[in-house]
Image (tube, rainbow, N blue to C red):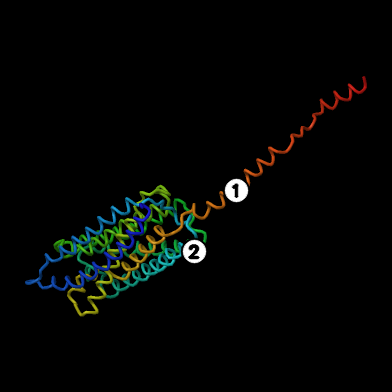
Amino acid sequence: MKKRFLPAAFWTMLAAAALTTVLRVIITPRMQETDTGVFKVSYFIIGFMLAAVAVLAVMTMAGRRGIYHLNDIPRRERMPVSVSAIVLGFALIISSVFDWWQWIAFGLTPPPNERVISGLDAATLAATLAFGVMAGIFFVYLGHKLVGEGPVISPVFSLAALTPVIWIWVRIVRYEISYSSAIPVEQSFYDFVMVISSMLFLFSFSKYISKTAKQGTTRQPVPFFSLCAAMMSLSGTVTSVLLYMLGETDAYNASRLAGFVDFCIGVFALCTSVVLIFGSRPSDNGELKRDEEDITAGAEEQSESLQPEQKTPTVDEILDDLRRNDY
């Protein structure tokens, strides 16, 4: 029974992401008027998202399934993670370089600001773009290695796995020091929670992929944080696209922090959860082979025990026999 909790958590996440998207598309436009905006209606969405996170936490903690390293999972089954990692890596590199060019050439900066508002904002923006390129290179390298035999775990690889965490952390710092940090939580809750869930997922994934966390246990946080990141990032980016298509310009501008990179993070988190929850365990592939080896070894031992013992005489025994024959 407990083995079904993780698959059920996955389908619950998909349903929660779809419902969150519908609620945000319906409610967000009603919150944009300065005088008549009913900001408290967003509490319905906030309450639903928190309830969904609580349900996912209970279901993932109650699940009984060992979470193994991607190197131990069959190459064919980990292909979604490798492909989504490569796409995320290129998205990070291209978006970081493009944002850097816009900043240098035109003074335009990525959300949440359109212009640099302080020296600290400029420093965090530069760090975000620099670590974005490094994080993109890491994801491209990781995806390429997962197509083959898998990455070689080393201290350098473990340090490189932290670059996505530093990138998302600096991004949160820039968000906090920007004008958006002065907006009440009921108006900026979605974007903030999306970035926080992405940071927690990337941090848990860096520990998991570098084998810092204990492997094969049922208490790894990667499935839970991957489900939360997928729910928040996918619902946020899809909502932004739908608001733009519906002509809700103000509502779209309020949700524009969720960009294409966040969508790629959501897809990567989704693929990670699929592989970890539905992928084969190492014992599933090696159990039959180990049983055959045990049977073969047992048969060899039994055949050896049935054979009569043949003792080879020593040199001293041969000499003693020769002396007896002489006498």
Per the image, label 1 sits on a secondary structure element best described as helix
How many neighbours does mark 2 have within 10 angstroms: few (below 14), some (14-19), or many (20 or more)? few
Quadrant of res 101: bottom left
Task: Report x, y in % for residue 326.
Answer: 93, 22
Q: Nearer the viewer, residue 45 or 192?
A: 45
Q: Is residue 53 left or right of residue 75?
A: left
Q: Is residue 84 left or right of residue 294?
A: left
Q: Which residue is mark 1?
A: 293
Task: Report x, y in % for residue 56.
Answer: 29, 56
Q: Is residue 134 left or right of residue 179?
A: right
How many neighbours does mark 1 have within 10 angstroms: few (below 14), some (14-19), or many (20 or more)? few
Q: Which residue is mark 2?
A: 76
Marker disc for residue 269: none
> Hey, which residue is sitting farthest right in the picture?
326
Task: Report x, y in % for residue 223.
Answer: 35, 56
**Residue drawn at point x = 59 percent, y = 50 percent:** 292
**Residue drawn at point x = 14 percent, y = 62 percent:** 184
